[in-house]
Image (tube, rainbow, N blue to C red):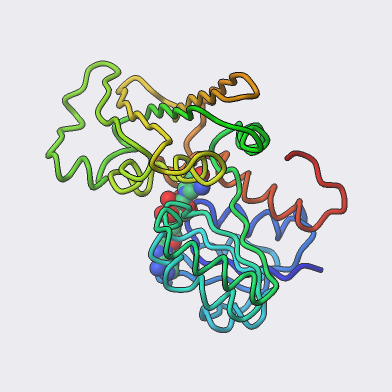
Amino acid sequence: MLKIGVIGCGAIGTQICKAIDNGSISAHLVGFYDRSSEHCERILRSLKNKPVLSSPDQLISKADIVVECASQAAVKEIGLSVLEAGKDLMVMSVGAFLDTDLLKKFVLAARKNGCRIYIPSGAIAGIDGLKSASMATIDKVILSTTKNPKGLSGAPFIVEKNIDLGSFHEKTLIFEGNAKEAVRAFPANVNVAASLSLAGIGSEKTHVKVFVDPEASRNLHEITVIGDFGTFTSRIENIPSPDNPRTSLLASLSAIATLKKITEPLQIGT
Ligand SMILES: NC(=O)c1ccc[n+]([C@@H]2O[C@H](COP(=O)([O-])OP(=O)(O)OC[C@H]3O[C@@H](n4cnc5c(N)ncnc54)[C@H](O)[C@@H]3O)[C@@H](O)[C@H]2O)c1
């Protein structure tokens, strides 16, 4: 049975641990770690089968795969040790991989140690089509994201530009740039821009628009891809996670689906 260790006990980590605990993923939860002991204890209380609390090093030695669902900093702190120990790594804070030197180091370590790095599709639909399309030429990838002001508060772009999120009365474009700039401006919001870049034409060519909408109760992502294959558009209205308005529930579900895929013989999708 696949042995899973989880780093980060927030909205996504909680859903993953519960999915293992209730048998939705046929795997064993060997442990989890969070820099907040309060968050660890909250998860522990919600599980029937309670793993022993572990340090990152203990998790790495016990698990077959370590799932990062914490922060870009956690990817940098823990990711390479996971791969150097020959263990697989799943990364949710995908924005970290727009640092091309970091990504190269990780891929090299994975290759050298015979392990894999998994990046779930996250909060969007269309990564499958984009990956297929990238086998020929792609001309354009455009992502438009619309969020409620609550989902954008505290982002570096909002703070640096001194934007008063309470001042918007209608849907308004507040950011336009490439995916690299978008991830720097909204690190906790546009991991999807990073995933699209990695699956498609890179972070400098992937175009991102961020809208704020006080009427929005869902996180909206609209993706347009144009290439040799033709054109596709995908539009998804995500329900925010009950534990974190910045994170869509679908992101947790995609992490669970990726872990399930690893444990099953039938593989569907690109
Ligand atoms: N790929 C996607 O589509 C997608 C979608 C949503 C969120 N995310 C990303 O996934 C990550 C987790 O999201 P979430 O909604 O569960 O966040 P969250 O804020 O609800 O939980 C994160 C948890 O990780 C812990 N943490 C943060 N940095 C840590 C570190 N360096 N070491 C140990 N623990 C640490 C925090 O204490 C917190 O409990 C975030 O980086 C988020 O941006 C990705």
Q: Is residue 109 above or below residue 227?
A: below
Residue 242 in sight: no
Image x and y of residue 34, in percent: 46, 69
Q: Residue at coordinates 56% horizontally, 20% vertically from top-left? A: 233
In the rendered image, the residue lying farthest to the right is 265
Extreme-left residue of the structure: 162
State how many labels appear: 0
Say left or right for 207 vs 1: left
Position of residue 56 relative to residue 97, above or below, is: below
Image position of 205 (left or right of 269): left
| Camera-nearest residue between 23 and 129 | 129
Q: Nearer the viewer, residue 73 or 42?
A: 73
Q: Tell me if 192 is positioned left or right of 177 in this view.
A: right
| Quadrant, the N terminus | bottom right
Residue 158 lies, in percent from the top left, at 20, 40
* Furthest residue in direction top, as rendered: 170
Q: Quadrant of residue 226?
A: top right
Residue 183 screen position, x and y as percent: 35, 46
Q: Does 51 appear above or below 267? A: below
Image quadrant in which you'd find residue 49 = bottom right
> Which residue is found at the position 52% from the left and 46% from the top?
198
Residue 80 drawn above or below residue 211: below
The C terminus lies in quadrant: top right
- Which residue is more in the foreground, 212 or 87? 87
Confirm whether residue 26 shows in the render. yes
Q: Residue at x 58, y 83 (%)?
A: 58
Ligand 1: which quarter? bottom left
Position of residue 200 measured from the top left corner of the image (x, y, whole percent): 54, 39
